[in-house]
Image (cartoon, helix red, strand yellow):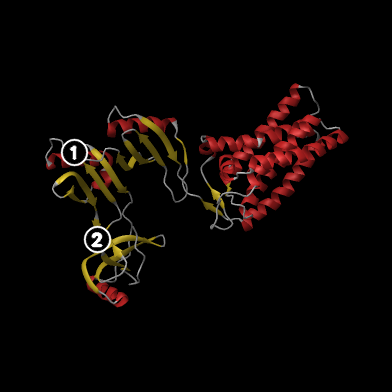
């Protein structure tokens, strides 16, 4: 929140300074009239102003085009492993610390701080100010509220200010939190739907870091220098991943499966090794057996040079069930020295599919009816996800002008059960 706000709001600092000057004088006068600690009350007001300036000044793109939503992000552990998450915690510490010192009512300040952070996220969702509501920010800010109240309470206790808690404070704070929580909670429940914001990178755990360094050494060699290891926590619709960046290349692995999803080498060219194509294939097959024992079982294998007759080579695995190509994909690029320089995968279990109603001839006729073009070749069946459901789909290549597949061939994708045209899936 803080990094994004400062980067997006060019006038944040001057606006804060001007507002601070305008607010400080009346706060000092009010504190003297109410017999509050003047310094603490003034610093509390400036801290509150800072929170509002950082979180609610218009700026950036936020969730433009997404409507009124609040994002579900990484876990609190993941958030706290990032600089942004730590800054979000610190943002609310001063306002609550100085609030306790100024008013000496910890329970009321705790209630007010929690409602403040919830209210800020609510306004970021409801107002078109280029900000994004995030439950991860809400959790981090709430932790900052608790930390600020505890620090303020400890400070007053050390200075022997008693009583720190009174029944009036507890009653006022509890009532305030209850009523405000019901109102804000109702607004979130009925007016701000939660959505999964997609995976975000957070710091890797010690277990992930140790495994990542071992995997990098296995793939790139012991001389490879690991530059960064970070993770994407598993959330709804997104698997957990570990990203490993080295000076030799990058690789991504699924976690906790510890299965490599992709690999890229900086030096992708062939190194003019002494291995024959058969020996290079054996090296790639050993790599596949090490990392993908389940995917290679029952799969058809091809081994082709990237350029005609020249290394590097690509070892590809595809699997067919009842004549339908399954969604699993595995392509391994290997050089003439047996070095693995690239891996591209789609690690999907074979889905259960309804029985196709259209045979190849019927699919070709249907494609010709829909397009006015002549069916060509190849024509094949694939498993494709349509509206979050796996379906058997005919891919019919046509002759004529229209949307083309790579290579300039017009392709029509037909649901093999309903005969309806479906959108191409890459």
62, 188: nearer the viewer = 62
56 left or right, relative to 376: right
Q: Earlier in the sequence, mark 1 or mark 2?
A: 1
- Residue 284: in sight, yes or no? yes
Q: Is residue 36 above or below residue 344?
A: above
Separation of marks 1 and 2 at Cα, in angstroms = 30 Å
Q: Secondary structure at mark 2?
A: loop
- Residue 104: in sight, yes or no? no
Report which quarter residue 268 is drawn in.
top left
Q: Residues within 10 Å of mark 2 (few under 14, many from 20)?
A: few
Q: Position of residue 77 (x, y in %)?
A: 52, 36
Looking at the rendered image, the quarter that the N terminus falls into is top right
Q: Position of residue 21 (x, y in %)?
A: 75, 38
Looking at the rendered image, the quarter that the C terminus falls into is bottom left
Report which quarter residue 271 is drawn in.
top left
Tally of numbered tags? 2
Q: Residues within 10 Å of mark 1 (few under 14, many from 20)?
A: many
Q: Position of residue 410 (x, y in %)?
A: 27, 67
292 left or right, relative to 280: right
User: Which mark is on residue 407?
Assistant: 2
User: On the image, numbered disc 1 is attached to which residue?
Assistant: 283
User: Which mark is on residue 396?
Assistant: none
Q: Residue at x 45, y 44 (%)?
A: 234
């Amino acid at each position: 929140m803080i990094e994004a706000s400062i980067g997006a709001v060019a006038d944040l600092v001057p606006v804060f300074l001007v507002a601070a000057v305008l607010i400080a004088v009346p706060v000092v006068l009010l504190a003297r009239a109410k017999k509050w600690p003047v310094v603490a009350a003034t610093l509390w007001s400036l801290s509150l102003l800072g929170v509002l300036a950082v979180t609610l000044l218009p700026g950036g793109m936020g969730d433009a085009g997404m409507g009124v939503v609040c994002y579900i992000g990484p876990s609190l552990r993941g958030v706290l492993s990032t600089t942004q998450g730590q800054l979000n915690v610190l943002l609310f510490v001063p306002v609550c610390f100085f609030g306790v010192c100024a008013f000496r009512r910890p329970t009321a300040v705790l209630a007010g701080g929690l409602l403040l952070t919830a209210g800020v996220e609510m306004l970021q969702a409801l107002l078109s100010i280029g900000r994004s509501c995030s439950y991860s920010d809400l959790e981090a800010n709430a932790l900052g509220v608790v930390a600020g109240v505890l620090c303020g309470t400890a400070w007053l206790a050390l200075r022997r200010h008693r009583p720190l808690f009174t029944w009036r404070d507890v009653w006022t704070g509890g009532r305030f939190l209850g009523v405000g929580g019901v109102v804000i909670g109702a607004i979130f429940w009925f007016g701000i739907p939660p959505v999964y914001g997609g995976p975000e990178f957070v710091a890797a755990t010690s277990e992930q870091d140790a495994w990542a360094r071992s995997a990098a050494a296995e793939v790139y060699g012991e001389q490879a220098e690991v530059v960064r290891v970070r993770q994407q926590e598993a959330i709804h619709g997104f698997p957990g991943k570990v990203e490993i960046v080295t000076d030799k290349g990058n690789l991504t692995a699924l976690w906790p499966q510890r299965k490599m999803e992709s690999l890229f080498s900086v030096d992708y060219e062939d190194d003019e090794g002494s291995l024959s194509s058969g020996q290079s294939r054996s090296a790639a097959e050993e790599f596949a057996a090490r990392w993908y024992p389940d995917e290679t079982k029952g799969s058809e294998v091809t081994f082709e040079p990237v350029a005609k007759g020249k290394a590097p080579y690509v070892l590809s695995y595809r699997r067919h069930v009842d004549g339908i190509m399954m969604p699993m994909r595995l392509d391994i690029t290997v050089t003439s020295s047996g070095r693995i320089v690239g891996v591209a995968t789609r690690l999907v279990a074979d889905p259960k599919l309804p029985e196709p109603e259209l045979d190849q001839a019927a699919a070709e006729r249907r494609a010709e009816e829909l397009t006015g073009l002549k069916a060509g070749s190849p024509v094949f069946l694939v498993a494709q996800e349509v509206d979050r459901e796996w379906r058997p789909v005919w891919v019919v290549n046509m002759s004529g002008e229209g949307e083309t597949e790579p290579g300039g061939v017009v392709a029509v994708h037909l649901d093999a059960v309903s005969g309806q045209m479906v959108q191409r899936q890459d």
